[in-house]
Amino acid sequence: QVQLVESGGGLVQPGGSLRLSCEASGSIFSIYAMGWYRQAPGKQRELVALISSGGSTKYADSVKGRFTISRANAKFAVYLQMNSLEPEDTAIYYCNLKGEVGGLSGSYWGQGTQVTVSS
């Protein structure tokens, strides 16, 4: 029904930057919001950043001022620019789409991309 393909993860030194990309494809009728979540070892998955169809954004307090979420509606894509990365940002980052797919409203996930911040 829908596929979310993430890219851009990797290994970076503290203070460095990465840009994550996620592009959705499939029988997407409408998108309410797209966002990024992350899960570190031994921790619960948490919201990193969210952007609504209207362009409103929401960020976790821990990333405010360092991360920026943006979207390209025409491509059903969402991006996460991550600056001033810290070791605490190490996690698997998941793309999420909330919307109507194949006639049903739901929440859909990508496979995840690893981000490791280490010297």
Image: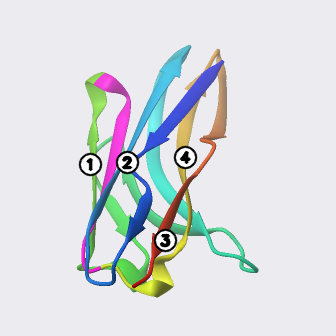
**Residue at the spot x=66%, y=68% of the render?**
45
Colouring rule applied to residues: rainbow
Q: Position of residue 112 (x, y in %)?
A: 59, 50
Circle 1/circle 2 CB separation < 8 Å: yes
Q: Is residue 38 left or right of residue 116?
A: right
The magenta span reads 75-84
- Does 82 appear in magenta? yes
State which tag comes first along the sequence, 3 or 4: 4
State which tag comes first along the sequence, 3 or 2: 2
Q: CA distance from mark 1 to mark 2?
A: 5 Å
Q: Nearer the viewer, mark 4 or mark 2?
A: 4
Q: Nearer the viewer, mark 1 or mark 3?
A: 3
Q: Is residue 20 left or right of residue 29?
A: left
**Residue at the spot x=50%, y=18% of the render?**
29
Residue 116: which numbered mark, if any? 3
Q: Quadrant of residue 61?
A: bottom left
Q: CA distance from mark 3 to mark 2?
A: 27 Å
**Residue at the spot x=49%, y=86% of the render?**
88
| Residue with the mark numbered 4 | 96
Q: Position of residue 115 (x, y in %)?
A: 48, 65
**Mark 3 residue element:** strand
| Residue with the mark numbered 1 | 55
Number of numbered callouts drawn: 4
Q: Is residue 51 left or right of residue 94?
A: left
State which tag comes first along the sequence, 4 or 2: 2
Circle 4/circle 1 CB separation < 8 Å: no
Circle 4/circle 2 CB separation < 8 Å: no
Query: Circle 2: is it few (<14), some (14-19), or many (20+) Cα within 10 Å?
Result: some
